[in-house]
Amino acid sequence: MAPSFESQKCPMRAEIAFVIECCAHGHAIAMSSLNANLLAELRGILGADGIVSRATELKTYECDGWTVEKSAPDVLLLPRSTAQMSATLAALHRRGVNFVPRGAGTGLSGGCLPLNAPVMICTSRMNRILEVDFENRRVEVESGVVNLHVTNAVKARGFFYAPDPSSQIACTIGGNIAENSGGPHTLKYGVTTNHVLALELVMPDGQVVELGGPAEERCGYDLVGAVVGAEGTTGIVTRATLKLMREPEGHRTLLAAFPDADSATRAVSVIIASGIVPGAIEMMDQLIIRAVEEAFHVGLPADAGAVLIVELDGLEAGLTAAADAVAAMTTTAGASSVRLARDEAERALLWKARKRAFGAVGRLAPNYATQDGVVPRTCLPQILRVIAEVSARYELRIGNVFHAGDGNLHPIVLYDEREPDQVRRAIDAGRDILKACVEMGGSLTGEHGIGVEKIGEMPLMFSADDMRVMTELRHVFDPHERANPGKVIPQPGACVEVAAPRRQVPI
Amino acid sequence: MLIGRDRVRAPSGAEIAAASTIVEPESVGEISEVVRFCEAGGISLAPVGAARTLSQIRRAPVAVGASLKRLAKVVAYEPDDMTVVAEAGITVAALNVQLARSRQRLPVDPREPGLTSLGALIGASHAGPLRLSEGTARDLLIGIRFVGHGGAAIHGGGRVVKNVAGYDLMKVMGGSFGTLGIITEATFKVRPIPEKYCLAMLPYENSADAFAAASALNNALPLSNLDLLSPGLAAQFGANRYLLLVGFSGSPLEISYQTDKIAQLTGARRENLDHESAAETYNRLRDLDPGPASLVAQIAVPPAALARTLESCGAEFHAHAANGVANILSPAETTTDRARTAVALWRETAHAARGVLRIVAASPELRDGLEMFDTPNSGALAIMRRLKSAFDPAGIFNPGCFVGGI
């Protein structure tokens, strides 16, 4: 059974200290402590410093950015090479032990929360950039490389790696691949799957396979496309060949202030409809503006109801005219002021403010949960009204900072985990928002993944047949569901409620 | 009676080599019926658009070809969302007529878009010159519906431009050549039609100079397309040398800047075309007739390796120069033996550059003994075989002609 919040009503869940599962497939034994022989074998493969098993150290790994649920693994493994990864997975496979892959743990949907998987495998030591090939605009990296390090390695030559999630100073390419991560500039440049050409995948049985290649065309099925976004349920990616993009000749970054969110979202539709394709259109509402301003003092208009950051990029020759056109459109839509970033430093400051908005929100409440629903762009005004209603109904503050150009929301629900009732309301508020997104023809998640957070909502989007076929696809890679079990697809057939030893947030 | 008698017919034209009987279902429900019927009887079944691909890759026709020409509607189009949902039987050209009313387009440009259904575009991974600036169907497909085994109507993705809910069935079905099910509906991101499009035509004495110019241009400008024709094909554009066709677009200011930049980077020998004739020339480039060639293959290598790869192949070519992708042609009078030798050389050359090769078209007499697809590495092929049996346990969907005999 999936760890939807419905299931937390089940008293069994909280009481089971450690669990032996018999799930629908009748395999996968998970134990609270691992067999001593297995530990010895893993030590032989990884060396003593490749294994972390002290509870105090493991606590760091009990959750990712989805902090509502927590569960530390029994053991953390830190392989340094594909060979070690392969030997590790083969050893686990022989003993039927499940595992959860982890990059930097910056995910926001609980994608690397161990569920019925005693072993966590972290790619952080596989962090080499193996080859930069400017001629072909390719870079080959190990999966533990930090996203921003890829761009840093190539920017002096005028290139960049396009997917730029807000967590890019920490998140890894492997994690980006698992979640098919996006970022502000995906509006123009696409998400991770559009930038991955080839993968080295260690299958859950330890076999190493090469998928895709450095050419633009493939041979056979698009297995790279099947693995990207599979949330670590097809094995562990150890290497990736990524596309590099040429840095545009110029940028114009505009900050437009609006009296309210409604007029800001209307401006988004007008810009999109005009035929101009900006590099990014981001929106922040009043709650976020104030938090960001308090934290970073970037000069955002604190009295504005909402701001848009619109970034245009391309040939210098066309940028001034395009920026003027966008400025005029925002003014017509009701903007009270429009400011053009004067120089690169001001542009960088605006982006810093945007990308650190989540951090700034930490000042407003002890806890927050970030949602990731998507709506068709024309439904933005409508969904923001729904979010305001939800906020009022559950008496919780909800801030909005999101990829407006993509229709990809990030409502941030503020709560205090010490108040069980607030946790409950935060979860219900999030679910109501997602439901509304799906009803408007949208999606549960634009870039954060299903993880554990939204697994209970999958049936809102997909039929039983859809999910059966998706499970068939997963089994092509992982027939025993050893890789990141319990994620993406809910399993209504499971016969025993499962929780690994797991410090639940009281509800 | 699964579907009406009037919608079951004998194949004609290219369909004859693709399928023995053609059915034209009018609904997804009818397709499901057909799938279940074929599974029960072990009858081979494949989707056919214009049958251009299927007729080439099959050694023998499938028993039943499902034409979706009666499932060719635009289901939903909201210009301000820049997304369109359409049934798989509509052609790229017909779809683009509707999108053009809002100054938008699906910017995937296969050869003869008036013959290319969305199902074929996705299933056979067709693309054209605009892949440089706009990507391929893979980059723009955000939702899919197909009928899979058991006749189940399956969907993946959705109608929004960013969506990571569930496994990416768009990628699985893309380039699957009808071997996993029948695609019935697709949702695409669409793009604005540029304000103005121009095309510079630059002749070169040899391919090395032409590729060097292409590389310099691609590094300097965000071009729309960058195509290089060998002399035999350049003749169709009145040239007798290597011909570089440089497409660029944007506002009048951007056009003027790019025109100057191209002249500066390549010397003054440019012939810029005005808007109307640029569009007409681009259409001829997209639909380029391989002429009397008996064999056409698509080769794809890392872009910087394309020049020397094509040199080694020693054949006439149409290259998407900055993508590392080219169609190469053998002369019309090629014998079976010579064709096999040529393909073996091409394959070896492609693989030496870590690339791939697939035969796009071959005359019937040459096709015997030629592998249309490369064989994936053993690890990947094993996964592909499992994928095929998971999605098509009865083995009815276009069997036996894809990679590794899938």
Image: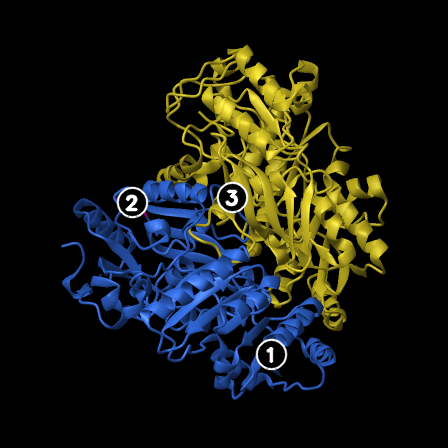
Chain colours: A yellow, B blue
Question: Three-letter amino acid code at disc 3?
Answer: Glu
For image coordinates 65% across by 44% down, the residue present is A141
Of helix, strand and loop, which one carries label 2? helix
Tell me which segment is drawn in magenta: B148-152
Question: Three-letter amino acid code at disc 1?
Answer: Asn
- Front one among B404 and B33: B404
Which numbered disc, 2 or 3, marks the residue closer to the eye?
A: 3
Residue holding disc 3: A210
Q: Is residue B18 left or right of residue A360?
A: left
- Check the picture and name the quadrant holding the C terminus of chain A: top right
Residue holding disc 1: B206
- Check the picture and name the quadrant holding the N terminus of chain A: top left
Quadrant location of residue B175?
bottom left
- Front one among A364 and A2: A2
Which numbered disc, 2 or 1, marks the residue closer to the eye?
A: 1
For image coordinates 83% across by 57% down, the residue present is A344
Q: x, y percentage for residue A231? A: 53, 37
- Front one among A295 and B313: B313
Protein chain holding label 2: B
Q: CA distance from mark 1 to mark 3?
A: 37 Å
Which numbered disc, 1 or 3, marks the residue closer to the eye?
A: 1
For image coordinates 55% across by 41% down, the residue present is A200
Vertical order, B205 against B303 (above or below): below
Vertical order, A458 against B342 (above or below): above
Confirm or deny contact between disc 2 and disc 1 (CB under 8 A). Answer: no
Question: Three-letter amino acid code at disc 2?
Answer: His
Q: Dot 3: few (<14), some (14–19), or many (≥20) neighbours within 10 Å?
A: many
